Amino acid sequence: MAELQALTDDVVAGNHILYHHGVFDGYGHLSFRSPSNPNRFYMAAALSPGRVTADDIIELDLDGEITSADKNRETYSERFIHAEVYRARPEINSVLHSHSPTVIPFGVTTVPFKPVASSGSFLYPNPPIFDTSNVPEATSVLVNKPEIGKALVGVLGQNSVVLMRGHGNTVVGRDVRETVSRGIYTELNARLLLQALALGGPINYIKESEARGRRSIGQQARVPSHGIDRIWYMWTDEVADSIERAQSRRTAAAH
Amino acid sequence: MAELQALTDDVVAGNHILYHHGVFDGYGHLSFRSPSNPNRFYMAAALSPGRVTADDIIELDLDGEITSADKNRETYSERFIHAEVYRARPEINSVLHSHSPTVIPFGVTTVPFKPVASSGSFLYPNPPIFDTSNVPEATSVLVNKPEIGKALVGVLGQNSVVLMRGHGNTVVGRDVRETVSRGIYTELNARLLLQALALGGPINYIKESEARGRRSIGQQARVPSHGIDRIWYMWTDEVADSIERAQSRRTAAAH
Amino acid sequence: MAELQALTDDVVAGNHILYHHGVFDGYGHLSFRSPSNPNRFYMAAALSPGRVTADDIIELDLDGEITSADKNRETYSERFIHAEVYRARPEINSVLHSHSPTVIPFGVTTVPFKPVASSGSFLYPNPPIFDTSNVPEATSVLVNKPEIGKALVGVLGQNSVVLMRGHGNTVVGRDVRETVSRGIYTELNARLLLQALALGGPINYIKESEARGRRSIGQQARVPSHGIDRIWYMWTDEVADSIERAQSRRTAAAH
Amino acid sequence: MAELQALTDDVVAGNHILYHHGVFDGYGHLSFRSPSNPNRFYMAAALSPGRVTADDIIELDLDGEITSADKNRETYSERFIHAEVYRARPEINSVLHSHSPTVIPFGVTTVPFKPVASSGSFLYPNPPIFDTSNVPEATSVLVNKPEIGKALVGVLGQNSVVLMRGHGNTVVGRDVRETVSRGIYTELNARLLLQALALGGPINYIKESEARGRRSIGQQARVPSHGIDRIWYMWTDEVADSIERAQSRRTAAAH
């Protein structure tokens, strides 16, 4: 239970952090796999990220059905993105879907979205692009059916990120903190690459040997005070007020 | 009366939201059609959006004359934009005029302002450009006479957005929340499209079939916790302090 | 005295506003001509704009010497910009010098800095570029001698704005509020023009007839609740806390 | 001791300032040379810059070993950047390493990073680019061994800034305030140059004669109320709350 509580705190913080950093607009969502049942995952009910509190985190199964007590909460229509990643990728324990603004242009053009800084090594060599117009079950860009989720996961393959044409992107990681960090550094790489391309001429991208140590999920150990373990604490400090205000409003609205 | 009060709260919030999101500078304005009289509409007296309070919302007729008690309030010189949209488009119940910064460049160049993300579907296929230099009654870019408003509405046609050359844009919707949301996603689409064009090569725009479900005003039902119904609550949370400060200053100034 | 106090309040607010809007970095300055003596002007002692309080506004003559009681205050080394504008342009009562970030690139390239929106009409047809490397008395880009100020004013001519190569720009107006507003809309025009140029193709600039009404200093009457009279109040609301904090720190430091 | 305390306060403020200005992300670091022993330097333990307090500043020797009492603090893995600069450049007393976002693109392309404004004179003629892929001891872009630090310092030479390919940059100065200021104006120059290049045509760069007075470390005297002495006080005012919150959280966590 303590582990579940800690992960719940992380997913709440992650929602606020991703919104604070401009990766999420009002429609992003973030989840984690249940630590006790690999066929369950947790995410917020259908709320904008800046309003998410611990009381809004619900449990779902891989068909996208609510399995926790609060059966009448509204769910994100694109929860199938998360469910199908958890079904296909056992080493992945956290997923986010965002409309990361500077990433979207790379999904509608033909320039490969390669990493230009070491912080984007998890993107190596470059994320594939998923397009719902190739999916018979899709009637819009939304991944609102299991079949569309499966198609997305097929394009994602073993990558950490998949771009979604005319829509946004999906990012996966071993845990909430890694996924949040990757979401933020995916947006940053888009800004850096756009600027590097504007400068013109050949670009000296991150090489395979440089990316390797960071790319393979499950092969990189966490080091206390380094990497995500360092930056996570500053990021959570920055959204502490935002989380507290969301909780206060929720409590006030319930009375 | 409760409906009018709720709409007044929305238009106050909308002013602060649009300013907070950088769509409005100090000169934008937002209105809604009277729920009881289709020939009347409500908007703020001539104030900058960050100062608007519920006490500043006045009623006007379609000639731009004040019809509420506070006859001596100053009005926006471009209120005719709103009046003429309400006259010509019965299904429209809210209008905004802004100097949305990233949209202006698309009004002075020849690149079509097409949607590159699903969130901009209401722009499909692309908004027309209105130019006051084609309007005999105009002596500047301002839409400060009924005739110029009629000319603008003629160019707007059945679209949701019209660009205004060297000036800004006008956005319409079924209600305040939809209009505010469209204003914000019009500005976002401008940023996305500018970046996609900078990347070069062919752009994979939103297709007609993808845009259709969202384009036709009045054909898309509101779904609780989804779309604008979700994001509106976060946006209003964010400007709650701003609205409260504006009300406090107004009260203090009155004493 | 009441007039001087009101102008002092405006110049304090203007410093904070220009910093808040990113037109000033830590080195900008803003002045007004004495309402009682055309050969005197007021500006802050050598402080960064976010620290300026009413107690820091000093009086100088057109040679840049302090004429108020506080003779031992440090002065801006580029006060000659202000002094020489006041000497040469009797209709001008306020001057600012900034390193407005998006304007600087237009001072080091050959693209004319023309207005693309009506809010930039005062720039029409386009500001000249001043270059200290053409001024024998200059040993750097700084306008830190009367002769260099005279050279700058010679290039400024009857324009409202002059770009300064590798340095920034200078903006003049009839009073503090107009000068502040022009400083902000000069920076905005730079952003808009940079984006319009990136889109490519011919640009539909503001025409002479459209710019005329706003260009000629002294010919445009102030209208209550419109133009600068409207936006100034929102801008000052936004920096009220910043001014109060600056005053508090100053008072605390004096004890 | 008073001097050490003052420098400690500066390095704490500098961490918060660089983060506030977007030069540091969560992984930047800043140091100063011991005023009493040229073979020692001070920097924070391995924390993100927004969390640094005076209690986190530790002393290290030029081999990167902790020499103060708190031997079990975690250190930045790239502390060798600082150590090797202090070993090779006796006139340098402060160093920062950042992932300054707009600078990174200039490290992966071939456009020389020349100064376009006088505030970037310390960059003249243009910083060299260091690439770990030319360093046998490096297995990633990180400067996490003394040998890689020595290679970096070899490329830095007598410059004030060195770009680091696919990674960031390193900035040196005579004291903390100068280094912080240079870090901020390096990022600004990247933005200005990117925009100037986008405008096209020849760029009128800062000339050698204009840069000279500011370039040579140790030759430019500090002038009270001018240059860094002016802006530093505003910058520290702006982060006073951030520093206080970091200290409060640290104290709370210790209990």
Image (cartoon, coloured by chain):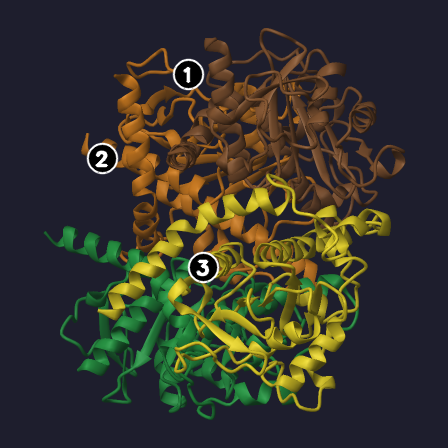
Chain colours: A brown, B yellow, C green, D orange
Secondary structure at badge 1 equals: loop
| Crowding near the residue tagged with mark 2, few <14, some 14–19, many ≥20 C-alpha atoms within 10 Å | few
Coordinates of residue D28 in the picture (x, y in percent): 48, 32
Position of residue A162 in the picture relative to residue A240 (left or right): right
Q: How many marks?
A: 3
- Residue at 28% across, 31% down: D35
Q: Check disc 3 and give the amino acid type.
A: Gln
Q: Position of residue A40 (x, y in %)?
A: 64, 14
Report which residue position mark 1 lands on: D74
Mark 3 lies on residue: B5
Q: Report, in whole angstroms, how far the alpha carbon at label 2 lies from the one at label 1.
A: 25 Å
SS for callout 3: helix
User: Which mark lies nearer to you, 3 or 2?
Assistant: 3
Residue A45 vs B184, above or below: the answer is above
Percent coordinates x, y for residue C168 in the rendering: 49, 67
Of the numbered discs 2 and 1, the one sitting upstream in the chain is 2
Residue C5: mark in rendering? none
Q: Chain of mark 3?
A: B
- The answer to whether residue D104 shows anywhere in this view is yes
Do discs 3 and 2 belong to a common subunit? Answer: no
Q: Quadrant of the C terminus of chain D?
A: top left
Residue indicated by mark 2: D3
Chain assignment, label 2: D
Q: CA distance from mark 3 to mark 1?
A: 58 Å
In this view of the protein, which residue sits in the foreground, D88 or D255?
Answer: D255
* Mark 3 and mark 1 on one chain: no
